[in-house]
Amino acid sequence: MFLISLLIIIYFLAPSVCYGHGFANHAQGAKATAMGGAFTAIADDPTANYYNPAGIAFLEGTRVMLGSNVFTSKKGYFESAGVSNMPGVTRGDKFNVKRDTNILPFVHITHAASEGFGLGLSGYSMWGQKNSWPDDWEGRFLPGGLKTEIASYRAQAVMSYAPMERMSFSAGVFYQWIDLHTSQRLWLPMLMSEFDYSIDGNDTGLGWIAGILFKPHENFSLGISYRSRVNHELDSLDIRIKPEMPALGIHNTRGTMRFTTPAILMMGTALSWEKFTVAFDVYWTEWSVQDRIRVKFDQPVLGVTEQVLDKKWKDTFTYGIGVEYAVTDYFFLRAGYIYDPTPVPSGTLDPMVFSGDSQLYCFGIGLEKGRFTADFSYSRIISKDRRFDNRIGEFPNPGGQRVVGDFKNASLDIFIGSLIYRF
């Protein structure tokens, strides 16, 4: 059985792009997402592998979950203040972020071993971001001014143990692959010309996860889980400038960069009575690891040996609440809400991650029949508008003045479907 499970995981290990909290994706199952991600103290299906692996110890038999997230295109636009003096740009001009759709498959497998032990295997996407802007928009000279793409995937293995009837512990490791791409235009006043500039790189790393689930009463539970940060050393960046002019120091090169994905602490509680279950979660995310991005060039470009971009992101607390109502023994209704503050301060806001504080409204249903369970959810993310007026807007451009404006109407739709089979 576990050989089959391993083959399923390998099948799903395809690079994917995701969206969400900063650049985190917590949508790891239709049931949990429909309940506002408040699942740390519930963890009663195979997505326990993600939210709180300690829950695996209480799942009977072997369970396989296959599913997918469908992220519609990120909507939003930049409204110019018209002060950059760039040709053809006036106050009130709007530049829409490009739209597309991304599909993220996931698989979670749990197996109840003997004497209170449980095992779990997973393949899922944890980090990601994708913003694409028009080729002729006012901010094309800013970092990520044309495109930013973060794609990732994780393969995870965990073990849980319940030394007593109402308490369990878990620990595990994960292998993380990440791929980064960013592109923009460069304006060189000495040549009065625009150049294409892009950076690409990827790396792998290891991290760990642990969790505790405590049920002081059969209708009340508490949960906590933690996943570590992962430091990625991208030591073979592909840095390209087009067109090349080697005589002027304008040429392609290689480079290095450190990129760290943050640690996350999840804490939750859940209460059940009659046909209702209500849950509340708090996520702490160590976004402060995104303090500064430093790209070192193997060969100087225009006499410069490195590019430094201050980020100064802040740690955040995300709050989620969810409710489930059992209409019958096999049909369930769910709803949830998430408040997710942005980690990006106004002083370092840029087109890479431009969304403000976000609210997620979540809905879903669950159906059980024999050995099968099918879950579906829909979530709508609505983000607060943000004013862009900082030093990043002073990157050289044809107008010679700071780019100023507002990022507005950022939103995103998420559809999730998953199927569980119990052996």
Image (spheres, rainbow, N blue to C red):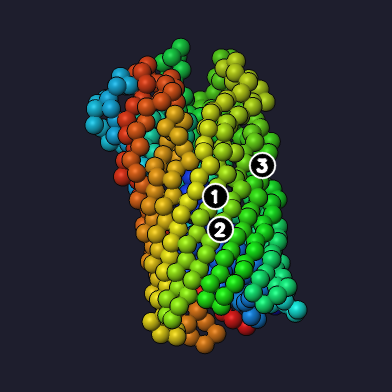
How packed mark 1 is, by other alpha carbons closer than 10 Å (few <14, some 14-19, many 20 or more), is some
Name the image quarter holding residue 364.
Answer: bottom left
Instruction: Pick the residue in front: 397 or 167.
Output: 167
Instruction: Pick the residue in front: 26 or 240.
Output: 26
Instruction: Pick the residue in front: 112 or 244.
Output: 112
Q: Is residue 26 above or below residue 334?
A: above
How packed mark 3 is, by other alpha carbons closer than 10 Å (few <14, some 14-19, many 20 or more), is some
Q: Is residue 272 left or right of residue 4?
A: left
Q: Is residue 7 left or right of residue 247?
A: right
**Pointer 3 with pointer 1, Cβ within 8 A:** no
The residue lying furthest to the bottom in this view is 370
- Identify which residue is drawn at 57% across, 26% down: 308
Instruction: Pick the residue in front: 200 or 62.
Output: 62
Name the image quarter holding residue 257.
Answer: top right
- Which is nearer the N-term, disc 3 or disc 1? 3
Residue designated by label 2: 267
Q: Amino acid at mark 1?
A: Trp
- Does residue 65 appear anywhere in the picture? no
- Identify which residue is drawn at 57% across, 25% down: 307
The residue lying furthest to the front in this view is 216
